[in-house]
């Protein structure tokens, strides 16, 4: 992991069309991550992004200070890194810069409310994602599916979720707590449901990075469809098999989408509405 950003990093991070995420550890020990496409590099040692609405990721960052980040451009080059929040600006050059962007200037609902300035801890990349191999990663899982399936009819992974998860346009990223306590990322496009309570995948897809995840660790898997921007986030326990596969026993499902990001599994029982 290097400790400076170069001009190539900055140019790619500035692209308007990209996946970029920020992740912070929550109080339950899971990485809380969300899409923040305004993430950019500035100078050799700084990562910045805009706050367009109030979200739990920013709230946690203000409290914890340390965060992981990642970026994936249309050229399928993947970066990941770590940063520490230094200050938040509500006026000045960066506010003007973000409010001049089309995503703010032509947005009826969300303009730039503030800018988060973060000191770079370290960065890795670019690492190209082998898109052509994603199908082969899925094929590695399928023969072992009978032994991997977990969950019954009322499991956390619903049929609607399966539809989103299995689309060819859905990108998937796993996140876990590194040895230094800061979240780390890896692409995991080949992850598929194994029953209604488990996600399974081939370790080969991100072997070098996944090797650092201890058995039983709490992890988060974020899945987002590029066409509709529908997203699902599952959280659970990480395990590996002797056959080169990994799986996540799903304990929570988080809806990261507007209008109300929230935990949707475990499910809250229906109750009568008595107050209006």
Image (spheres, rainbow, N blue to C red):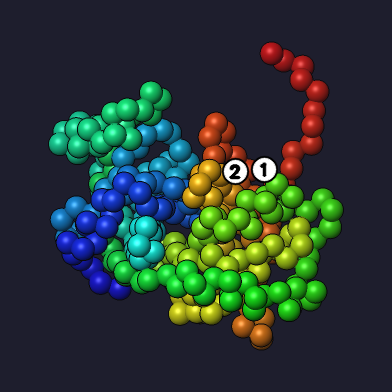
Horizontal arrangement in the rendering, residue 37 relative to residue 227 (left or right): left
Q: Outermost residue toward the right?
A: 153
The residue tagged 1 is 264
Mark 2 touches mark 1? (CB < 8 Å) = yes
Q: Is residue 29 visible?
A: no
Quarter of image, res 238: bottom right
Residue ID at (74%, 59%): 197
Task: Residue at 79%, 76% (x, y): give it.
Answer: 147
Locate residue 59, reporting x and y percent: 43, 41
Q: Nearer the viewer, residue 170 or 207?
A: 170
Which of pointers 2 and 1 lies earlier in the amino acid sequence? Answer: 2
Q: Quadrant of the N terminus?
A: bottom left
Above or below 170: residue 88: above
Residue pointed to by mark 2: 255
Distance (Cα) linking label 2 and label 1: 6 Å
Q: Secondary structure at mark 1?
A: strand
Residue 271 placed where, x, y %?
Answer: 80, 28
Q: Residue at x 78, y 68 (%)?
A: 149
- Dot 2 crowding, Cα within 10 Å, few <14, some 14–19, many 20+: some
Residue 39: image location, x then y, percent: 32, 49
Question: Helix, strand or loop at disc 2?
Answer: strand
Would you place residue 260 above or below residue 118 in this image?
above
The residue nearer to you, when weighing 109 against 251, is: 109
Q: Which of the 4 image quarters holds residue 146?
A: bottom right
The answer to whether residue 151 is visible is yes
């Amino acid at each position: 992991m290097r400790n400076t950003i170069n001009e190539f990093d900055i140019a790619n991070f500035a692209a308007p069309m990209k996946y970029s995420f920020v992740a912070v550890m929550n109080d339950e020990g899971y990485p809380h991550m969300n899409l923040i496409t305004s993430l950019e590099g500035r100078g050799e040692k700084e990562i910045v992004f805009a706050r367009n609405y109030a979200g739990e990721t920013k709230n946690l960052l203000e409290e914890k200070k340390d965060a992981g980040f990642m970026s994936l451009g249309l050229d399928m080059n993947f970066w990941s890194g770590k940063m520490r929040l230094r200050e938040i600006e509500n006026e000045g050059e960066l506010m003007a810069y973000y409010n001049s962007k089309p995503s703010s200037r032509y947005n009826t609902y969300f303009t730039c409310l503030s800018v988060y300035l973060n000191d770079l801890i370290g960065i890795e990349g670019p690492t190209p994602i082998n898109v052509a191999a994603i199908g082969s990663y899925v094929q590695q899982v399928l023969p072992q599916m009978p032994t991997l399936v977990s969950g019954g009819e009322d499991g956390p992974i619903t049929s609607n979720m399966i539809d989103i998860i299995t689309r060819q346009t859905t990108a998937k990223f796993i996140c876990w707590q590194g040895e230094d306590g800061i979240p780390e990322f890896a692409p995991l496009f080949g992850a598929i449901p194994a029953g209604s309570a488990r996600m399974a995948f081939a370790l080969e897809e991100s072997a070098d990075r996944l090797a650092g995840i201890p058995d039983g660790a709490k992890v988060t898997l974020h899945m987002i469809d590029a066409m509709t921007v529908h997203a699902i986030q599952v959280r659970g326990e990480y395990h590996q098999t002797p056959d080169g596969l990994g799986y996540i026993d799903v304990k929570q499902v988080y809806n990261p989408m507007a209008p109300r990001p929230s935990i949707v599994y475990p499910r809250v029982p229906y109750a009568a509405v008595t107050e209006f």
